[in-house]
Amino acid sequence: MANRNFLHVGALTALAFSIFSTPLRADEQAMILPLDPVPLVAETGAGEAAFKVEIADDASERSAGLMYRNFLPDDQGMLFIFPQQQQVGFWMRNTVLPLDIIFIDAEGRIQGIREGKPLSETTVTPGVPVQFVLELKKGTAARLGIEDGDLIKHPRITDPAGITPTNPQ
């Protein structure tokens, strides 16, 4: 009888470990988008900061975001593009990296910088309508002097649909 109980407890422990450790096995399910060829530039009081960005511009890409990633270079991030300026909220479900979540309006001005806490299901919002969100490694905004009101430049901010002479859709 003792052996059966041991097996039962062992199986439950293995199941619990499997369930609770899944989000920590980062890159197994991560969505990796191509880096945009044009850098995103933040114009700050301290100067310009350039980033390579992945573009999440449809619902499924915005939903997956940086989930399951276990590494993000200091000079890289993800730019989320919404069809129009609107109220948005982000959570960190299945996201193991701590992030700076930078909310940007339709004109490219930062409307709020919030902390994304790993694996949190608390909604993070700027409290005002925005059209873009930039996620960077936590602490990047403070380190580079990126603040509310700073201007973010990228062709997809001036043309969110991405329709250019070289990219007709």
Image (spheres, rainbow, N blue to C red):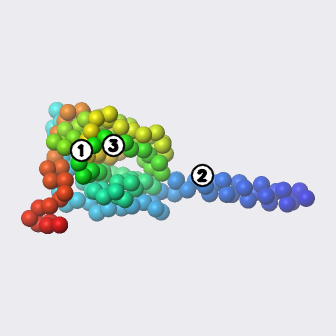
Q: Amino acid at mark 3?
A: Val
Any mark on residue 85, and which?
Answer: 1
The residue positioned 32% from the left and 62% from the top of the image is 33
Q: CA distance from mark 1 to mark 2?
A: 36 Å
Q: CA distance from mark 1 to mark 3?
A: 9 Å
Quarter holding the C terminus is bottom left
Q: How would you rate the neighbour count of disc 2 (Cα within 10 Å): few for under 14, some for 14-19, many for 20 or more? A: few
Residue corresponding to mark 3: 88
Any mark on residue 20, and which?
Answer: 2
Q: Amino acid at mark 1?
A: Gln
Say whether residue 98 is visible: no
Q: Is residue 96 left or right of residue 154?
A: right
Q: List x then y, in percent, for residue 93.
A: 47, 48
Quarter holding the N terminus is bottom right
Q: Nearer the viewer, residue 42 or 132?
A: 132
The residue positioned 35% from the left and 45% from the top of the image is 137
